[in-house]
């Protein structure tokens, strides 16, 4: 699908979509609440969230969806041996650990870009904790057979913290206590998100300065009635659109959220945008945008919208964290430089740094690379381009924010299909 975005002035308000990251963690926990009912209010229905619900259902949960709510009856009893994680890396890495609780062999795989994303970090820890685990040369599919016994394992957090989150969710049901020794942990706020979800289900984990996690075994997941908070990652594209194209308010966001991408407000302020924070969200208005520096190492999903912002800032902006982009839905650093380059942007990637020299963007044809974050970033940048920007592969926004283009159009974005 192609979406054409014309130069537009935007103003108004948009409801943030529910967080797919929170939704998937809640879904995994709800599955493990044996015989108990979890009510998930404000559920995410993006592709990644639906993949997690599908896998939870295959693993034994009874799931019923109504308007504005998903009800999950917990119970771990696989209905088949194949688990399809779609294109969600979080789904695969979370549920690999959960599946390892079972004694039968289960195979987790997916489609598209997920088959090119590394999962080698799951093998050694699962084996150390008593399970069988095998990948295809470090990539999906993943074969696991439990049960997880518990014990001590060393976890590499340099590529992603997602598998650590999976272990933290699974190990409370192991027969013995566990100790996870973590090296090079990135994205600490995402671990905080996992711990917050576990607390809602009355599960205990001791965090020792993010270097060790002690997980008592033999715990019980209680039932929960829980609301999925708004997604700062998806909202970042809208807030940047407000800075570039006018004035936007995004509500349904928690200013005190542990989500890493809440830091987009600091980047917008550093760039000269006018930022107001409310109890239910934030408002951003454009101004004399200037070059800024920002370290997105713990919030790599912010880099695509911040590249869009930097393209409209006077001077050269410096964004750290490029190394975290190599193994996402695409090689985001390379795709950002190439696709924004088609619009006349001057972007250089040197090691861990992305440098963006601001200036007026031209119109033109670009491609999302199948990456939802890049599609949304290109659309935000197009609001102040000289000509129409045609984005091929725009349908990929369904991975995290299915209504993105409709919501952008609702506040004045001129968008044609």
Image (cartoon, rainbow, N blue to C red):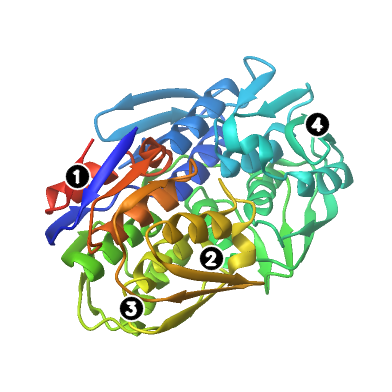
Rendered location of residue 154, percent (x, y): 83, 58
Secondary element type, mark 1: strand
Q: CA distance from mark 1 to mark 4?
A: 50 Å
Q: CA distance from mark 1 to mark 3?
A: 24 Å
Q: Residue at x 55, y 30 (%)?
A: 86
The residue under label 2 is 189
Could you tell which of marks 1 and 2 lies nearer the N-terminus?
2
Packing grade of label 1 (10 A; few <14, some 14-19, many >=20) is: many
Residues 381 and 286: in front is 381
Packing grade of label 3 (10 A; few <14, some 14-19, many >=20) is: many
The residue under label 1 is 415
Could you tell which of marks 4 and 2 lies nearer the N-terminus?
4
Packing grade of label 2 (10 A; few <14, some 14-19, many >=20) is: some
Q: Residue at x 45, y 49 (%)?
A: 22
Could you tell which of marks 1 and 4 lies nearer the N-terminus?
4
Q: Nearer the viewer, mark 4 or mark 3?
A: 3
Q: CA distance from mark 4 to mark 2?
A: 29 Å
The residue under label 4 is 146
Q: Quadrant of the C terminus?
A: top left
The residue under label 3 is 313
Packing grade of label 4 (10 A; few <14, some 14-19, many >=20) is: many
Residues 55 and 312: in front is 312
- Say which quarter of the image contains residue 362: bottom left
Q: Is residue 51 left or right of residue 210?
A: left
Q: Is residue 264 left or right of residue 388?
A: right
Q: Is residue 185 visible?
A: yes
Could you tell which of marks 2 and 3 lies nearer the N-terminus?
2
């Amino acid at each position: 699908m192609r979406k054409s975005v014309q130069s537009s002035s935007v103003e108004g308000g948009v409801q943030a979509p529910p967080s797919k990251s929170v939704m998937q963690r809640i879904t995994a926990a709800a599955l493990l609440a044996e015989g108990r009912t979890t009510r998930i209010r404000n559920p995410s229905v993006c592709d990644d969230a639906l993949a997690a619900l599908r896998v939870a259902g295959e693993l034994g949960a009874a799931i019923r969806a109504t308007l504005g709510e998903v009800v999950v009856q917990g119970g771990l009893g696989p209905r088949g041996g194949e688990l399809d994680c779609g294109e969600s890396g979080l789904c695969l890495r979370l549920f690999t650990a959960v599946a390892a609780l079972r004694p039968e062999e289960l195979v987790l795989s997916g489609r598209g870009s997920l088959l090119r994303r590394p999962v080698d970090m799951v093998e050694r820890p699962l084996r150390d904790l008593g399970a069988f685990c095998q990948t295809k040369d470090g990539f999906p599919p993943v074969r696991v057979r439990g049960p997880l016994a518990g014990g001590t394992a060393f976890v590499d957090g340099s590529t992603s913290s997602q598998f650590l989150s999976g272990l933290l969710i699974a190990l409370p049901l192991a027969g013995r206590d566990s100790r996870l020794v973590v090296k090079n942990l990135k994205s600490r706020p995402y671990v905080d998100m996992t711990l917050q979800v576990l607390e809602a289900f009355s599960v205990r984990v001791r965090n020792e300065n993010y270097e060790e996690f002690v997980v008592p075994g033999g715990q019980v997941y209680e039932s929960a009635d829980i609301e999925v908070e708004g997604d700062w990652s998806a909202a970042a594209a809208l807030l940047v659109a407000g800075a570039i194209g006018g004035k936007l308010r995004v509500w349904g966001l928690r200013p005190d959220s542990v989500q890493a991408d809440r830091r987009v407000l600091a980047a917008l302020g550093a760039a000269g945008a006018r930022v107001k924070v409310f109890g239910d969200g934030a408002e951003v208005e454009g101004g004399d945008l200037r070059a800024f520096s920002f370290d997105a190492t713990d919030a790599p999903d912010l880099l695509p919208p911040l590249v869009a912002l930097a393209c409209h800032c006077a001077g050269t902006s410096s964004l750290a964290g490029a190394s975290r982009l190599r193994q996402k839905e695409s090689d985001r650093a390379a795709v950002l430089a190439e696709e924004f380059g088609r619009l006349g942007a001057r972007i250089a990637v040197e090691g861990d740094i992305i440098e963006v020299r601001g200036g007026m963007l031209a119109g033109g044809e670009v491609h999302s690379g199948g990456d939802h974050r890049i599609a949304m970033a290109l659309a935000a940048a197009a609001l102040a381009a000289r000509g129409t920007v045609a984005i091929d592969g725009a349908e990929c926004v369904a991975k995290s924010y299915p209504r993105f283009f409709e919501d952008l159009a609702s506040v004045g974005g001129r968008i044609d299909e």
